[in-house]
Amino acid sequence: MKQSQLLIPTMKETPADAESISHKLLLRAGFIRQNAAGIYSYLPLGYRVLRKIEEIVREEMERAGAVELLMPAIQPAELWQQSGRWEVYGPELMRLKDRHGRDFALGATHEEIITSLVRDELNSYKKLPMTLYQIQTKYRDERRPRFGLLRGREFIMKDAYSFHATQEGLDERYQIMYDAYTRVFSRCGLNFRPVIADSGAIGGKDTHEFMAFADIGEDTIAYSDVSNYAANIEMAEVKHIPTQSDEDELPLDKGQAISGDDRLIMVQWFKVNDQAAAVLHRAGDEINDVKVKNHLNATMVDAFEGHPAFNLSELKNKDVILLADNGVQNVVNGVIKEGEQVAHFNVNADRDLKAVTFGDFRFIKEGDPSPDGEGTIHFTEGIEIGQVFKLGTKYSESMGANFLDENGRSHPMIMGCYGIGISRTLSAVAEQYHDDRGLIWPASIAPFQVHIVPVNVKNEEQKQLAVSLYNTLSGQYEVLLDDRDERAGVKFAEAELIGCPVRITVGKRASEGIVEVSLRSKGDKEEVSIEQLPEFIKEHLK
Ligand code: 9G3
């Protein structure tokens, strides 16, 4: 491709409102342009990278036995009413009315569509298992879109759905997709890992998130420094290690409270659906509302103030849910405080907290022992680029997607769903592959593999050689020729910004058939004869 034909509006300055490095560089290098908050155009170079990532995904989905189809972005509200999610999702689900006043949703995901399709078209165990996927634009009206393509309101996702007659079938398919995701992200050159994750509002039990490491990542990953344990911090379980104390248990609320932070027990209140829940925890520990929500199997859990004063004898009679983090069991003669008020003192869990349900409710902390018993927990930030879920029968039951087994009995299909953020993956690669001069694309997804830059297009010899190299190399590589009449410094700086892996500079020694080759991922440049060029390129594009 000739650069004079392409729209690559590079920028010298970094746009002020771009916070993440990938957002800055994708804008500066002319890969994307914003049309509205969280809504972008993919310009030619950005779109070429996007399509490469899609092709890798298609190859691995094909290898994993998934079949591609395409579903509508506009979804009838009836389907979301059948699944019960029309009411569950708030303003994040973009909705519209057609000219007849009928309600529709802009597709944030496609469980409802795919389940209704399979419900209407498949009904025998003989037709299962079936794994279908699409690569489609998704719409989610994020309150605060940010970091460019990392958190957009319109983005591109590969979403796959599998349908099974048995749990074993789902377990097997889950592993196949998990392995396919590992291949996809490895082929994109990403530094990533799968982590144990929370299945959130979509139900289902097993789920893993694929996290690309990046400081800008909005997810915190707790991982062991010894084993391969890793979990989204929302899901990381805290291993309770009971401690013994030879201190005598003092009578509850009699005498004086003994001070000391290690005796302090705090109360965190939550509104759970329409009930109040008090969660006791040791000072210094923080309650993880996702753990409270999952423990109570609730849909809404919000921390709230303005609750009744904490009083053990009163509250156990009211319909207040009383919970305590396991850590409270290690407190001897504890002091339960609300703000500055002492609610109780000389509290000893085994004697005084019988009405309280104990569980793992706190966030894991750096330095905690790894839940698998091997090593210590450390934190790092990650960008969620993929998710695999075991959905079970949540959608097939609510939407009546059943199959007849070999005895003619009807059962709801068992489902899995699997997502890859295509546009997010593009940004994650940019987050991991750049330097102070610009982007550094891995060869597998670079917009072009070879970038030919003649130093001076007015010099006939340089121009001739550049064009002839372009013509020969275009046969086996994707080549970008900078045919513009620009100063050399500008062309070199832009080549570095765009970040194609191999650059061929045609300069003074063109008359001797010598060109300079450089790899964007390494600084070194070397002069090679045009005869050596094909070998050099093949060697370095592996
Ligand atoms: C919505 C809105 C936002 C959402 C969802 C629905 C996330 C929603 C979870 C999933 C689960 C999987 C298939 C591919 C892989 C992920 N945000 N989720 O269901 F209406 Cl506004 O999307 N879906």
Image (cartoon, rainbow, N blue to C red):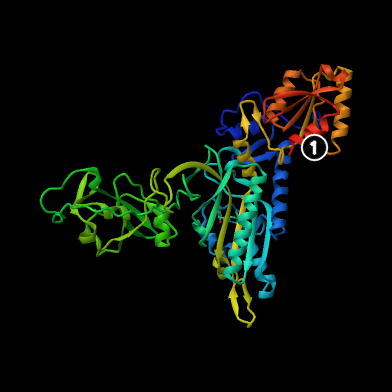
Front one among 479 and 119: 479
- In the picture provided, is 274 more to the left or to the right than 474? left
- Residue at 70%, 39% (x, y): give it: 42
> Relative to residue 206, is residue 512 depicted above or below?
above
**Could you tell me how many numbered marks the image carries?**
1
> Relative to residue 274, is residue 413 depicted above or below?
below
- In the picture provided, is 290 more to the left or to the right than 477? left
Residue 403 seen in render: yes
- Residue at 46%, 44% (x, y): give it: 225
User: Horizontal and vertical percent for residue 120?
Assistant: 67, 71
Query: Which element carries disc 1, helix, strand or loop?
Result: loop
> Relative to residue 83, is residue 153 depicted above or below?
above
User: Horizontal and vertical percent for residue 295?
Assistant: 40, 60
Q: The N terminus appears in which quarter of the rendering? A: top right
Ligand 1 resides in the quarter of the picture at: bottom right
Residue 107 seen in render: no
User: Horizontal and vertical percent for residue 296?
Assistant: 39, 61
**Residue kind at label 1, given as amino acid type:** Glu
- In the picture provided, is 25 more to the left or to the right than 358? right
Residue 279 appears in which quarter of the rendering?
Answer: bottom left
Q: The C terminus appears in which quarter of the rendering? A: top right
Bin the neighbour count of mark 1 within 10 Å (Cα to Cα): few under 14, some 14-19, many 20 and up. some
Residue at far left of view: 255
- In the picture provided, is 305 more to the left or to the right than 348? right
- Residue at 59%, 43% (x, y): give it: 152
User: Horizontal and vertical percent for residue 528?
Assistant: 80, 25
Which residue lies under the disc numbered 1?
478
